Image (cartoon, rainbow, N blue to C red):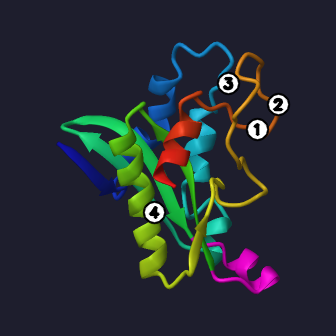
Amino acid sequence: MLQIAPVETSKQLLQFIMLPFELYKDEPNWVPPLISEQKKFFNPARNPYYQHSEVQLYLAMQGKKVVGRISAHSNTQHNKEHSENIGFFGFFECINAQAVANALFNTAYEWNKQHGFTSMRGPLNFSVNEECGLLVDGFDTPPMVMMRHDHRYYQALYENWG
């Protein structure tokens, strides 16, 4: 049975960080992040993003197995600068299962809605100063600095969710 759980413990945060290592283990063009840097990045005491914006990370679980992840977050600086009321999502990773993707996207959407945002934008891994967007072509080449490398099936997961 599929369950979406907020990341609340250090064990869950490590599961969130480590999921891409499992999903991309056979992808020769995926460049893994440094785990120590990811731990700092998601630490509110170490990342200044948390000083001005809210973040909620989620895991998709099937039993004890992590099968997906996503963040729902605000970007107060963006909304002030652009006079918008937009919520965001990012850090999406998922097995090739539309039901899992839908549950993750719906969870991020509901978080943003509950926080009073009129729409949701993404994928942005917090902001345009980090990785953003979705790879839809060029899967056979290594990514450039600050560019994502996604699975080919992600585009369909996004489009099918709407």
User: Magenta stretch containing residue 114, yes or no?
Assistant: no
Q: Position of residue 56 (x, y in %)?
A: 46, 64
Q: Is residue 144 above or below residue 77?
A: above
Q: Position of residue 15 (x, y in %)?
A: 39, 39
Q: How far is mark 3 from mark 2, CA to CA?
A: 10 Å
The residue identified by callout 2 is: 144
Amino acid carrying label 4: it is Ala
**Residue at the spot 77% in from the left edge and 27% down from the top edge:** 143
Frontmost of labels 3 and 1 is: 1
Disc 1 crowd rating (10 Å Cα; few below 14, some 14-19, many 20+) is some
Query: Which element carries disc 2, helix, strand or loop?
Result: loop
Residue 108, numbered circle: 4
Q: Nearer the viewer, residue 9 or 2?
A: 2
- The residue range painted magenta reads 74-85
Q: How far is mark 3 from mark 1, CA to CA?
A: 10 Å
Amino acid carrying label 1: it is Met
Residue 147, numbered circle: 1
Q: Earlier in the sequence, mark 1 or mark 4?
A: 4
User: Magenta stretch containing residue 81, yes or no?
Assistant: yes
Q: Quadrant of the N terminus?
A: top left
Q: Is residue 57 left or right of residue 29?
A: left
Frontmost of labels 3 and 4 is: 4
Q: Is residue 161 visible?
A: yes
Q: Position of residue 149 (x, y in %)?
A: 67, 31
Q: How far is mark 4 from mark 2, CA to CA?
A: 28 Å
On the image, which quarter does residue 7 sit in? bottom left
Q: How far is mark 1 from mark 4, CA to CA?
A: 22 Å
Q: Earlier in the sequence, mark 3 or mark 4?
A: 3
Amino acid carrying label 2: it is Met
> Tags 2 and 1 in contact by the CB under 8 Å rule?
yes
The residue identified by callout 3 is: 31
**Residue at the spot 74% in from the left edge and 29% down from the top edge:** 137
